Amino acid sequence: MTNTTHLVRAADAEVLDGDPGGTITLLADAADTGGALSAHRSTFRAGAVGAPPHTHHEASELFLVLGGALRVLLGEEVTVLRAGDLLVVPAGVPHAFEAAPGHDAEVLFVLAPARERAEYYRLLDRVHRGQAEWTQVGASQDRFDNHYVDSPAWAGRDGADAN
């Protein structure tokens, strides 16, 4: 790992907008930070599907809710994060997220240590645009340290009384 300074001006950030439910703004990838972290900002429109249950074997993931409300799976618990809330999910803990019912959400995500993940988000964008298949996302789990898991708690979330 090297000491690397990385600055992204808002006007210069790459914005992926193929998902009608929101956007992903790429901020930093492993190569940008000497392997320290990767970061992106996502917006989710009310009712938008977010990330399904998954784990990262190597990285912890930080969530900072910048606006709105985000429904999150943490292990087997479903909760709601609101503007200003910060959450760190350690490696190996199943998690998922989406806009909380009736709310939009804007969230900063930071994963550390870093792995090149920008191409994962570009792949998702291509899927939403009909230029790639969901099977390609499933096949990329090891490459991007994004391992999908089953979660009865998440599957039953619509009836859950989240905080």
Image: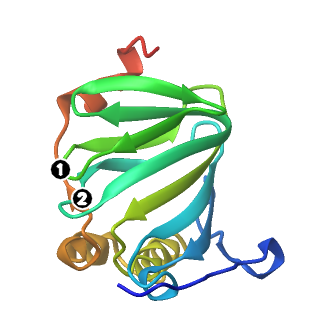
The picture quadrant where one finds residue 146 is bottom left
Q: Does dot 1 land on a helix, a strand or a loop?
A: loop
User: Badge 1: how crowded within 10 Å, few (<14), some, or many (20+)?
Assistant: some
Q: Is residue 12 left or right of residue 138?
A: right
Find residue 53 and report its horizontal and vertical position in percent: 28, 46
Instruction: Give the mark nearer the N terminus: 1 vs 2.
Output: 2
Q: In 3D space, how far apart are the residues under numbered discs 1 and 2 (Cα atoms)?
A: 6 Å
Q: Quadrant of the N terminus?
A: bottom left
- The numbered dot on residue 92 is 1
Find residue 149 and report its horizontal and vertical position in percent: 17, 49
Name the residue at 59% across, 73% down: 26
In this rendering, the answer to whether 37 lies above or below 31 is: above
Q: Which residue in the rendered view is the most extreme toward the right? A: 11
The amino acid beneath tag 2 is: His
The amino acid beneath tag 1 is: Gly
Find residue 71 and report its horizontal and vertical position in percent: 48, 31
User: Badge 2: how crowded within 10 Å, few (<14), some, or many (20+)?
Assistant: many
Q: Does dot 2 land on a helix, a strand or a loop?
A: loop
Q: Circles 1 and 2: CB distance less than 8 Å?
A: yes
Residue that carries the numbered disc 2 in the rendered image: 56
Q: Is residue 49 visible?
A: no
